[in-house]
Image: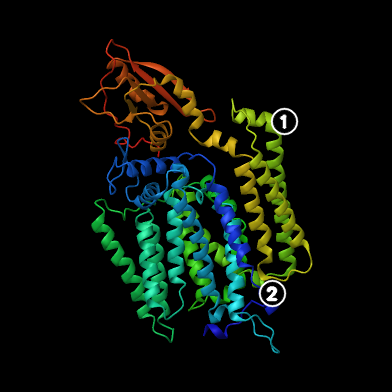
Amino acid sequence: MNTKLPTPAIVTQAAVRTLPRMWLWLLCLVYTCAGFVGRHPWKNEDMAAYGYMQALAQGHTPWLKPVLVGLPLEPAAQLLPVWLGAIALHMSPSWIDPEMAVRLPFMLLLLLCFACVWRATYYLAQRNEAQPVPFAFGGEARPIAYARAIADGSVLALIACFGLVQFSHETSATLVQLFGASLLFLAFAQPPGHALRTWLLTALAFFVLIFSGAFAWGYVVWALTIVGLARSMLTHKKPLLGTIAVYASAGLLVSVIARGLLDQPFWQWPYQWELHQASQWLSFFKLLIWFGWPAWPLACWAIYRWRAHIFKRQPSYHVFLPLCFIVVTVVLAASSGGSGRDRTLFLSLPMAATLAAFALPTMRRSVSSLIDWFTMLFFTISGVAIWVIWTATQTGFPAKPAANVAKLAPDYVPVFSLLSLVLALLATLVWLAVVVWRTGRHQAALWKSLVLPAGGATWCVILAMTLWLPMLDYGRSFAPQIEKIRPHIPADVQCIWAYGLNAAQRAAFSTQAQWPLQAPSEGSNCELSMVDAVQLKHYEPLLKAAGWTQLKRIERPTSDEAIVLFTYRHGANSGPALMDVSHLRGRSRH
């Protein structure tokens, strides 16, 4: 029996005091708002999703087959993110900026991810095999208080993860997939005796995963976990057949319904093993190191300390469940390429945070102190660097950081914002207060070792999204390129052909710049054509042969991406269209 195994957790009741709910959820709210509020849509997925949302909200494309200026949504199953944004645009009042309106449901999803992780860890920590060692004369942590402290630690560990920052603040399918993964994890973490709630959570998780393009990940995790449960039936005294039936029926039913709604198959296998060389393995391991930091060292420690509960015929569920999710996700991430590797690995962060939380009751004081000092130094140095670079852009001193910024972002003009400065100063004061609190000798809380990592990560995100926001917008949005193109676009232009533009470019030029971008079609003419420079070699001979002449090549200030404008050189005001075959030839860059 699991209850007879020796547990490595030694926790007193004094160590499981609850982190005040207000401070925990305020931290989650600040972390969420810091990455969403005040910025432009960034390339590529963030901007592309915004374009499809606008097309749906304006009634320019069908809801089941969204098209943006002639370019279909890819992958076609990622419908739920653009649906959420389009619905938000429909429901939002006129005084809310559309770019902010589409982010509101995604902000809610990120907060719900934190809530799902907290609740899943809370349920797992209440299991008998997860409880700490009972003391001979009492005084050990009570089960409910212990579960709450572990759950608080899991949320702090998730916020601290480096890999959470970027993708969790995109209005893209990746954040919706994270919510689906958290829901599925919560469904499997449900305590016995809640069949209906388990069924509903599993069904909702599969709906979210299927309609956000992560069906393959969800199906593999779901199937392997069910196999693990079936294996436990061989030795478990309580019958698990009913539990297995709940998980299996929910997943299969939603899959069948989704297949009926979608014309295209959503179960296509997106993974292919690509790690064939030593350099590729090295790159993957580097990604693992920084992406899950600091959760993965704690998770590894938890695996080591709870090894007697894992490597046996019937593993303890509170460590087996998150470990199963993590292993499957890492293997699938290794089978992905490009940004798909990061985005697949992103789905393992909630489970890594839960496993990291179970390391807390097993850590020695010296290890906890090492984590505190390393975290304090790392985030303090990072925050000071952000302040120094901002000061250099505003004053020119120190000269070297100012020169580096000028080299990376040519023609960038520094912008001063008093509100941003005040927010950055307040965040810095809070960070200093957290450091003073943590370095005191009176803290005995179980979650104390994760306060500095979570607080430092939030502090640096706030600094970057206040002090550096103009620079980040300049480097990652399409606004600077739009301003460079605008003088060459006549105010009374009727339409512009789009050749080889990816979804993000079409979204930026049609929604942000409000240019009448159109997909080339027979029977109509335009006076301007816009070509992605990457595909210029393919389109330039065809355009010139049809009577078009190159007008201007406009570079992005911070990259080698460029747009080439063509105008019709004959006496007529408009020229014929050529077929845009970039997406058919598989060359569009989404």
Hey, which residue is sitting farthest bottom in the picture? 137
Q: Residue furthest left?
A: 523
Q: Horizontal and vertical percent for residue 212?
A: 38, 53
Camera sees residue 16 = yes
* Amino acid of disc 1: Thr
In this rendering, the label closer to the viewer, 2 or 1: 1
Image location (x, y in percent) of residue 191: 46, 77
* Helix, strand or loop status at disc 1: helix
Which residue is more in the foreground, 499 or 272? Answer: 499
Vertical order, 160 against 396 (above or below): below
Q: Is residue 302 above or below residue 39?
A: below
Q: Residue at x 51, y 52 (%)?
A: 168
Seen at 53% across and 61% down, the residue is: 114
Give the numbered dot on residue 583.
Answer: none
Where 466 sits versus 571, above or below? below
Left or right: 23, with 214 as reference point: right
Front one among 226 and 304? 226
In terms of image quadrants, where is residue 352?
Answer: bottom right
Q: Which residue is rendered at x = 74% and y = 63% of the image?
A: 369
* Residue 298 appearing in the image: no
Q: Is residue 488 left or right of residue 352?
A: left
What residue did someone put label 2 on? Answer: 15
> At label 2, which amino acid type do we have?
Ala
Residue in the foreground of this view, choosing between 525 and 306: 525
Is 74 on the left or on the right of 377, as rendered? left
Q: Residues within 10 Å of mark 2 (few under 14, many from 20)?
A: many
Image spot of residue 559 (x, y percent): 52, 30
Residue to which mark 1 is pinned: 395
Residue 140, position as x, y percentages in the image: 67, 82
Mark 2 to mark 1 CA distance (whole Å): 48 Å
